[in-house]
Each structure stands twice: as C-alpha cells, then as structure tokens.
Image: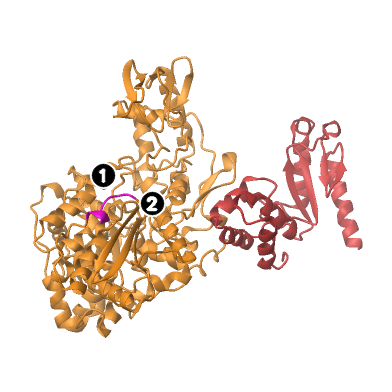
Amino acid sequence: MSDTVRKTLFVEGKEVEFTDEKNLLEVIRKAGFEVPTLCYRPELSTFGACRMCVVEIEGRGIQSSCTMPPEPNIRVHVNTEKVRRIRKMVLELLLSNHDMECATCVRSNDCELKDLANKYEVRDLRFSRKRTLAPIDDSSPSLVRDPNKCILCGACVRACNERQGLGILAFVNRGSRTVVTPALGMNLGDVDCVGCGQCAAVCPVGSITVKSDIESVRELIDDKSKTVVCEIAPAVRVAAGEEFGLKAGENVIGKLAAALRMIGFDKVYDTNFSADLTIMEEGTELIGRIKAGEKLPLFTSCCPAWVKYVETQHPDLVSHLSTARSPQAMFGSLVKDVAVNRDGIKREDYKIVSFMPCTAKKAECLREEFSVDGERDVDFVLTTQELIRLIKASGINLAALEPEELDLPFGMYTGAGTIFGASGGVAEAALRTVYEIVTGKALDNIDIEATRGLQGYKELKAHLAGTEVKVVIVNTLKEAEKMLQKVIDGTADFQVLEVMACPGGCIGGGGQPISCNDPAKKQMRANGLYKEDSELPLRKSHENPEVKAIYDSWLEKPGSHKAHSLLHTSYVNRFETCYKNQKSK
Amino acid sequence: MSPKTICLDKVDSIIDSVGNKQSNLIAILQHVQAEYNYLPSDALVRIGVKMGISPATVYGVATFYSQFSLEPKGKYQIKCCDGTACHVRGSNPVLNAIRVKLGLEDGKYSTKDGLFSIETVSCLGACGLAPVVVINDKVYPQMTPDKIKKTIDDIRNEEEGE
C-alpha cells in the first residue's frame, strides 16, 4: 500500500479521486464524463491545438483540459453554456477551412469532426472559406492525403515522429498559411514514407486515408473468365467484426469465409498458411546463420514497412534482413506458381486478393521482384477497413452469418501462423519450430509468455542445443531504430530481432478499423489471436500437414533451390530514389 | 535562371563547423543561406539526413521563419517595411508598385533575371522615415510608388550600363 495522500477534485459537483493521470481530461473521462476532443490521442504526446476539450474551472475560467495537470480541490464544469459556445465556435472555425464534402468522404461514418459538428448543432457557418483547394496527393500506393480536409490537429505529425521516428509529415509555413505536408511540399510517394498508415490511423477526419482498391477487386470478381482467390491475414479476423457490432477480438474467420464466398471469391485461403511456411524458411535460415555465425542478428522480414525502413534509412544493414519473403508475398508467389505450373491455369486468369490489416502491404505487392512476366503475385491488397466496406456494400451482415470452413490446401494453418498478427508472434512461432528442429525434443510449454504483450520492447533467451540465443522483439520503428543503433555500434547482444512497425504489431495496423481513442481494443484483438492459437489442435508450423505436403510435392525442402526462387527475395537501397521528384516551383 | 551549382560538400562542412546538434539547426540554415543566397531543396534534404532530423522537419523550420528563402534571392534584395508606422503611412501602395514594376506573379518573390527579390519585414527601426524601403542595406526613406519605381529604373539602367 502506498501512503500517498488521497487527492480529489470535483467534476460537476462529484468528488473524483485522481493519482498520476497525465492531465485533467483523463481524470474527467475516468469519472465517466464526456469531453470532446479532436487533436488528443491518449497514446501520443499532448498537443493542445484543437481547443475542443475546454472546461470551466471555478475561479480560473476556461482551460483546455488536455494540457492542464489535475489539481486537488478544483471544481470543474464540463458542459456550461460558455463551454458549449466556445466548442461550437471552434467547430465553425475548423469547418470554415474544411471542404465539407462529407457524402463522398471515406471517413463519413467515423469522422470525429462531423460527429461533433452534429452534436453541437453547427448548422450554418458564419465564416466564409478562405483557403483555396489544394491538389489531392494520391501518389502513394498505400495512402491518400487530402489537404482540404486537414484541421491541423497534428496527430499524423506526432504519430510519424513519436511512433516511427520518421517525421515524414511536418507543419509547414506559419499562421493562416500553415499546412501539413512532406518535405519540400513533395508527394508522399516521392519521399521515404514507409506506408505504415499510422498517420491515417490517428487522423480524426478524412485528411489521410487508406487508398482504396475496392473497385479494382470488384472488376476482377465480375470478370467471369478469371479465377479469383483470396487470403486473409491473421490480424484481420480479430478486427473485422468490430464494425458489425461484434466485440473487438472476436475471431470471425469462419464468417469471413462465408461472406467472401457470397461476394464471389472462388477460394478463400489463409495467410496463416504462408505464415507457417515463413517459419519453415526463416527458421531454416536462422539455424544456418547461427551455425555459420554470420549476418546476425537476423531481422524478421514479415513487415513491409520495416523492410522499407531498413532499405531507406539503413541500406548498409539489409543483409541482416531475412531473405524470406513476407507471408503475403510467399502466398502470392507459391499459390500462383502452383496454379500456373502445376494446374495449367494461365497466369493472367488466376488472381489473388489479400486482406491485410496493413497499408504498407499495398506497396509490397507492387514491388517488381514480386511479379512474373509483368503479372503480380498478389494482384490487390484490401485492408480490413476496405474488407468491411466491401462486405457492407454487398448487403451482407457479417455478424449474422454461419461460419464456414476455409478452402484447402492453402486454408490450413496452425496456431503458430495465427499469432503472427501480434507483436512477438513471429518470434514465438519460430521458437516453437526451431527449438524442436535443433534439439529434436518437443517443447514442454509452447506458450512463450515473454514474447507476448503490447509493450514496445521485449526480450528473451532460448537455449538451443547448447547455444544460447537472445531474441529481441520490438514494435514501432522508433523502438526498432534503438536496436539498429546497437547493431551499428557493435553492442547488439541479440541474435534475432523481430520488428513490427505498428504499435502492438499487425493488430494495430494502419488498415485496421480506426481505434486510436480506445487503446484497449488492440489488447482485445491480441487476446483473440492467442485464444485461437490455444484452441487449435496444431500449434507448430512444422506440424501443418499442408505445409509438409507442399514441400513434398512442390518445394522439396525448406531452403531448397525452388523454395529459394519462390519464397525468398533480396533487398536494395531505396533511399536513392527518394526526394528526387521535386515539383517545379 | 541557374542558381549556383549546388555542391553539397559545402553543406557538410557547414554542419561540421557549426556542430552537428539538433539545436544548431537554425544556425546551420543561416550559414547555408549565406553561402547559397537561399536554401536549395537538395541542401535541406542533405541537412536532414546528415543531422538525423527528418527532411520534413527541416523544411518546416525553413518555411516557418521569414528570414529563410527557398528561392534564390536577387542581386538586389529589396526589403519593404510593413511595420505599423510604415503601414499607416502607405507601405502597401509602395509594395504593390514594386511588385508591378518587377512583374512578379502571386507567390513569386524573385525576378526571373535574378536581379531583384522582395520581402516584407515587420519593422526596420526607422519609423521616423516611414514608409521605408531597404535595398541591399541602403535605406530609402519616405517612399512613394513613383519614387520607388524610379529607384528600380535607376538600378536597372546602372546594371545595363555595366
């Protein structure tokens, strides 16, 4: 028990206890009162730009509650006439610089500005629009930036700086001419943006959104001459239900299979299958590198934002990246190769769509090395957000569907594949398999708790037949950069580095349903993955019967020549092409 | 218009001499601007990469302060004061006259021939002489649209005569 003095303040006359909350806003919300915010993001630094969270404090007048530390005995009012008048004025001013094209905005359903304008009865605007319309930046394969919707809350700037350490976006100019743009006013596609989409995940409006490929996928499905199959990534199944009234973390993989068949996909497969395959390849590679004592630490290569980060920020270190392609890329190349070279389907008639929690995967599938004869391995990537819209637009209520089985063989997976969706999952899955291959013994307890949890840094040591291997697991690129600095200055004492660019791993991906004001959702999604893992009969990648079968019939063995050509890749310096395409001024 | 060919080695040596610390960013930008007469885009990216500050952040700083110019400044740098005293005594007509005389479109601050560039400043501390224009450190007091046009003509004639 701590012996600190009990501190309280009063919200609308109710006595409220507080301890170490970082601001008054958190105290008020904890007490069950609602205070509107636009720029405030609990997981990012406090900015105090939007002024929506103003409250009235007796004897002190109006204060913004997000920037004020809680103090004992103050008397706070959260909804007085004056407070409401100020909030309404703020909304009017913000809207006077907003394009208000709500009907065609992708964020129409979850726009925080629109929601508040409605709540505060903003019906006609007293202020006329001053800004002229700026061009929309759709140069990135992952994201679309519409400056005309930006309310300068700075959430994207903070997310990119504080989570990824990249600072791709910044406030430019000053005063009424302030805008948020990449360096030199360039487009996102021309700078070293990794496409993780964390900026879009925290945008309260539709200023940065996920680039939609829904129409392209519809065209494929409507073309009856094509066979269209899909793969579903681990983290999608525990988030897609959220928008259909189901709880975050509820596993809807069976319902998704049913929905996607109704929509017209010929086969519904699972990226978990190729996650298992990834473990076979990457695990073999790790064992080889440890034996040879070279190119250590090994960096995981599942996360395309992380891979691009290394290629742009640290091209000298690309040799550390596992050459194993990501599960999405492996799935595309293997499944298409089997369809074309075994089953005799023309490459242009066999299409693969993947459903991902990730915006960077959209860029990954466009990489030239993941194409054969100009035909991509994975044709299109839809994020969880797009998947939800696709299902809704097809008139399907996901929640009401009876779950169906996935198609075989590429819908077969183990629990090891499922946990790829949470930070630490790849390491845990790899250890389950590598341990057994190296020691020849079964692992006593395959729940490796040290790999789990949403925290940015985790580490553990594994004993593999006399060799101690230290595994470091980080999420967010800012955490990853700290580890890279250790590699650069020679103080890295670990042999494996698992990196996921998004907070918490893929469950917190930039393509997931927006959840920035409810950090608890990420934990619920992670719990959903570990729950599925614990309930599956097979929980080790090397026990996946279809993975064994595909090695026997098609790939020979992990690390074989054929496996290399289909399942591995190489990396290049990608910074050289950034900041080159400068607009003429 | 071809500004000085950009040799980024010079940027590197400026960073080294001022000190590669984030808090020195503004000083470094000032030195780079002194060297090139403006802040070339390539230099901003180079500064960011070398200092471990994102190029966007460097660009944000460079666009925040009016002392920094992202386009080459002219051989003759015109500073038109728009402080309170100059403003009430008619600096706006003077500024407009300069822009018209130089044929500057909206959003442009330098002439195509590289001879003139214009900026407004908030006070030159010479309020008694309002409205004031300063061209390359020479003060032109009590300006009117006609007087400033003639001054510009004089400079042009002098340049052509050389």
- Residue type at mark 1 is Lys
Magenta run includes residue A450: yes
Residue A198 numbered tag: 2
**Furthest residue to the front?**
A466
Q: Which residues are magenta?
A: A449-455
Note whether A268 is above or below A165 in the view shown.
below
Check contact, mark 2 vs mark 1: CB within 8 A: no
The one nearer the camera, B45 or A476, is A476
* Image quadrant assignment for residue B133: top right
* Image quadrant assignment for residue B65: top right
Q: Colour of chain B?
A: red
- Residue type at mark 2 is Gln
Q: Position of residue A405 (x, y in %)?
A: 9, 61
Note whether B54 is above or below A111 in the view shown.
below
How many neighbours does mark 1 have within 10 angstroms: few (below 14), some (14-19), or many (20 or more)?
many
Residue at left offset 82%, top offset 44%: B134
